[in-house]
Image: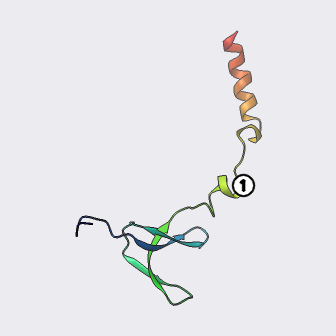
């Protein structure tokens, strides 16, 4: 490999800010902060707004469009008249 042209690929700790979950993967993500882990390692820290640990789609808390208080039915009724 040529020197100086490849990104810095290293283990990075990603932290979900909404629930505090942390996971470690190899990444080239730019970081300015570090975090000290329980096992004594100090890794670069990348903060996320949401991850699979807190996103409604992955946690099963996402609401279906059909269960939104009859708004879909109101829409269908309103535009069913215009379609005729």
Residue 8, quarter of the rendered image: bottom left
At x 56% / y 72%, what residue is drawn?
23
Q: Is residue 77 left or right of residue 16?
A: right
Q: Is residue 16 above or below residue 60?
A: below
Circle 1 residue: 61
Work out whether residue 3 or residue 37 is closer to the camera in this orientation and state it: 3
Question: Can you give x and y, in whole percent of width and height, for residue 49 in the image?
Answer: 52, 63
Question: Can you give x and y, in whole percent of width and height, for residue 19 in the image?
Answer: 61, 70
At x 50% / y 65%, what residue is drawn?
48
The quadrant of the image that shows the C terminus is top right
Q: Is residue 58 left or right of residue 48?
A: right
Residue 10, quarter of the rendered image: bottom left
Residue 60, quarter of the rendered image: bottom right
Q: Is residue 1 left or right of residue 39?
A: left
Q: Is residue 41 left or right of residue 82?
A: left
Q: Is residue 83 above or below residue 49?
A: above
User: Please, which residue is most extreme toward the top here?
Assistant: 84
Q: Secondary structure at mark 1?
A: loop
Work out whether residue 5 or residue 49 is closer to the camera in this orientation and state it: 5
């Amino acid at each position: 490999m040529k020197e100086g042209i490849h990104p810095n690929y290293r283990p990075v700790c990603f932290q979900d800010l909404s629930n505090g979950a942390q996971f470690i993967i190899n990444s080239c993500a730019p970081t300015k902060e570090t975090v000290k882990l329980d096992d004594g390692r100090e890794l670069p820290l990348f903060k996320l707004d949401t991850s699979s640990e807190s996103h409604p789609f992955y946690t099963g808390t996402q609401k279906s469009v059909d269960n939104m208080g009859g708004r879909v039915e109101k829409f269908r009724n309103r535009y069913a008249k215009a379609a005729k």
